[in-house]
């Protein structure tokens, strides 16, 4: 016979799927997390700069035409 807890969820997990996991699986392991690669930071900065420039030009052309 399998024993089950009366409470199957953990409200501190903040998400229904994470709350349904066993406590040993929910441990946060920051030491295993890999640091972000420097090329990803540069890529994100370049993409954000491109998006800002594109939107600024789009707004300027739209304002000029209108």
Image (cartoon, helix red, strand yellow):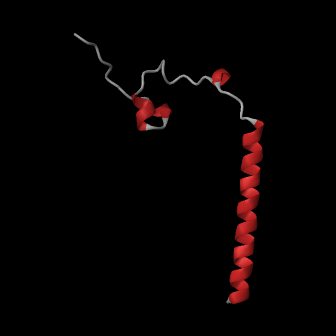
- Rendered residue at 70%/69% (across/down): 55
Q: Is residue 57 positioned above or below 13 on the image? A: below
In the rendered view of the protein, which quadrant contains the C terminus?
Answer: bottom right
Q: Is residue 63 left or right of residue 11?
A: right
How many numbered circles are shown?
Answer: 0
Q: Indicate the position of residue 24 as horizontal and vertical percent values.
A: 48, 18
In the rendered view of the protein, which quadrant contains the N terminus?
Answer: top left
- Where residue 38 sits, quadrant-wise, is top right
- Where residue 65 sits, quadrant-wise, is bottom right
Q: Indicate the position of residue 49 as horizontal and vertical percent values.
A: 76, 58
Q: Is residue 16 left or right of residue 40?
A: left
Q: Is residue 21 positioned above or below 50 on the image? A: above
Q: Indicate the position of residue 3 as horizontal and vertical percent values.
A: 28, 13
- Rendered residue at 70%/77% (across/down): 59
The furthest residue to the top? 1
The furthest residue to the left? 1
- Rendered residue at 76%/53% (across/down): 46
Along the line of sight, which residue is nearer the eye, 50 or 15? 50
Along the line of sight, which residue is nearer the eye, 52 or 16? 52
Q: Is residue 8 left or right of residue 25?
A: left
- Where residue 54 sits, quadrant-wise, is bottom right
- Rendered residue at 31%/23% (across/down): 6
């Amino acid at each position: 016979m399998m024993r089950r807890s009366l409470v199957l969820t953990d409200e501190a997990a903040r998400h229904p799927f994470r709350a349904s996991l066993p406590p040993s699986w929910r441990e946060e392991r920051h030491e295993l997390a890999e640091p972000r690669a420097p090329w990803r930071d540069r890529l994100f900065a370049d993409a954000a700069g491109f998006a800002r420039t594109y939107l600024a030009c789009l707004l300027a052309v739209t304002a000029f035409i209108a």
